[in-house]
Image (spheres, rainbow, N blue to C red):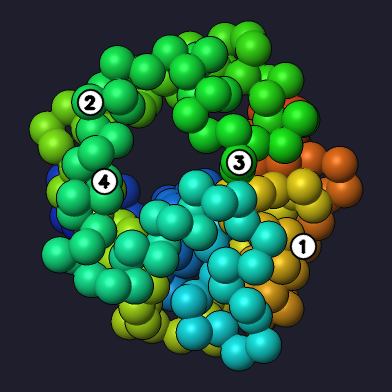
Amino acid sequence: MDVVADCAEVLAWLGADRCLTSGASGGGPHTLACAARLDGVAGCLVIAGVAPFAAAGLDWMAGMGQDNVDEFGAALQGEATLRPFLEAHEDDFGSITATGIITSLASVLPDVDRAVLSDQLGEDLALSFHEAVRLGIDGWLDDDLAFTTAWGFELDEVAVPTMVWQGELDLMVPFAHGQWLAAAIPGALAHLVTGEGHLSLAHGAIDAMLDELVSFL
């Protein structure tokens, strides 16, 4: 929920009274928090976003690749276990290449995601990894712990137009998460796409996603 106050400060500084909010993967809960609690939000886009850990009827880690199962298994044991787990990857992620991503994250990358990592997206993602751990793993750790605890708001508080996009072949955030969110968010516009993964989904459809999001203004 801290993201709501942070975004309110940014909007106040900009002098903006309306905005759109979007988040992918682990950014999904943050964008939904803004859709639920931030004044002035006109629409929300969730791209392959995680569902709440305690979501009724959802086996949260079912369908995840082994890398994610190991990471969130460590998160469930608390910071004392999770911190050294993440620190063991810090140096590698700080200098990883696009090819290295494919190798290091093999268990969470279906073929469609590996294919898009072979072009500019792979280089961009590697740079984002470098930046993510440039000052350490604290942000990564905080996110993992937050994903496995209550979010601090209810999805029925989301009263703005909200799109849920999810790829059927996703091994990072399984398809069932998108299905669950689409059913739980009032009036959600569901785009549950066959044949796409975690990365290929937005890579191929980002223009359509943003066009629909902007239409909510």
Residue at 57% x, 72% y: name it.
60
Residue topped by disc 2: 91
Q: Nearer the viewer, mark 1 or mark 2?
A: 2
| Amino acid at dot 4 | Leu
Residue topped by disc 4: 86
Return the residue nearer the eye: 53 or 38.
53
Q: In x, y percent, where is residue 105?
A: 52, 34
Q: In x, y percent, where is residue 126?
A: 42, 19
Q: Give the Cα separation between the discs numbered 4 and 3.
A: 17 Å
Residue at 29% x, 16% y: name it.
95
Residue 190 circle label = 1
Residue 89 circle label = none
Residue topped by disc 3: 107
Q: Nearer the viewer, mark 1 or mark 3?
A: 3
Q: Give the Cα separation between the discs numbered 1 and 3.
A: 27 Å
User: Earlier along the polypeptide chain: callout 4 or callout 2?
Assistant: 4
Return the residue nearer the eye: 181 or 65.
65
